[in-house]
Image (cartoon, rainbow, N blue to C red):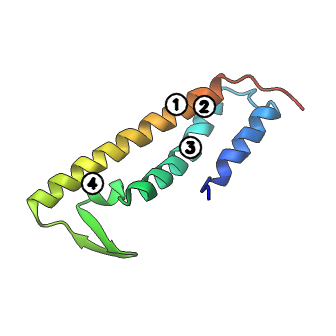
Amino acid sequence: MYNLDPSVFSYVLSVWCDSTSNGLFAVQLFIPFAFAILFLISHQYELDPILVFLGQSESTPFRTLTIREPYVRKLLLGRAIWVTTLVATCVVALTLIFWAVPGHRL
């Protein structure tokens, strides 16, 4: 029912075990959250923004086509920008939440 990335659970565990002693914890959170949220939102919208920014579109799984129609390109670019905005917002929000929560050693 829920499609969660395993990296999210590892960072939840690291917060509970108080492994936030170094200052790179927010950077360590950012990368897995970025991939997890990108995959989840791309799946929800059925659109890969990376392919659209490269001028490609996926017609069937693992088969890409070059976007030739200007109207379709404009539509897909708008949706890709929206998906990218959602991904960036969710990643920043989750990173700040997990960065601000104090750890507690179990």
Please state which of the two labelled residues, at mark 3 or mark 2, is closer to the viewer.
3
Please state which of the two labelled residues, at mark 4 or mark 1, is closer to the viewer.
1
Q: Is residue 39 left or right of residue 3?
A: left
Q: CA distance from mark 3 to mark 2?
A: 10 Å
Q: Which mark sits nearer the N-terminus, 3 or 2?
A: 2
Quadrant containing the C terminus in the rendered view:
top right
For the residues labelled 3 and 2, say whether their Cβ atoms are less than 8 Å apart.
no
Residue density around tag 1, few if under 14, some if 14–19, many if 20 or more, within 10 Å: few
Looking at the rendered structure, the secondary structure element under dot 1 is helix
Looking at the rendered structure, the secondary structure element under dot 4 is helix
Q: Is residue 19 visible?
A: yes
Q: On screen, 95 above or below 64?
A: above
- Tell me the kind of residue under disc 1: Ala
Write down the residue under mark 2: 26
Q: Is residue 22 left or right of residue 33?
A: right
Looking at the rendered structure, the secondary structure element under dot 3 is helix
Q: CA distance from mark 2 to mark 4?
A: 27 Å
Write down the residue under mark 3: 33
Q: What's the mark number on residue 93?
A: 1
Q: Closest to the observer: 55 or 24? A: 55
Write down the residue under mark 4: 53
For the residues labelled 4 and 1, say whether their Cβ atoms are less than 8 Å apart.
no
Residue density around tag 4, few if under 14, some if 14–19, many if 20 or more, within 10 Å: some
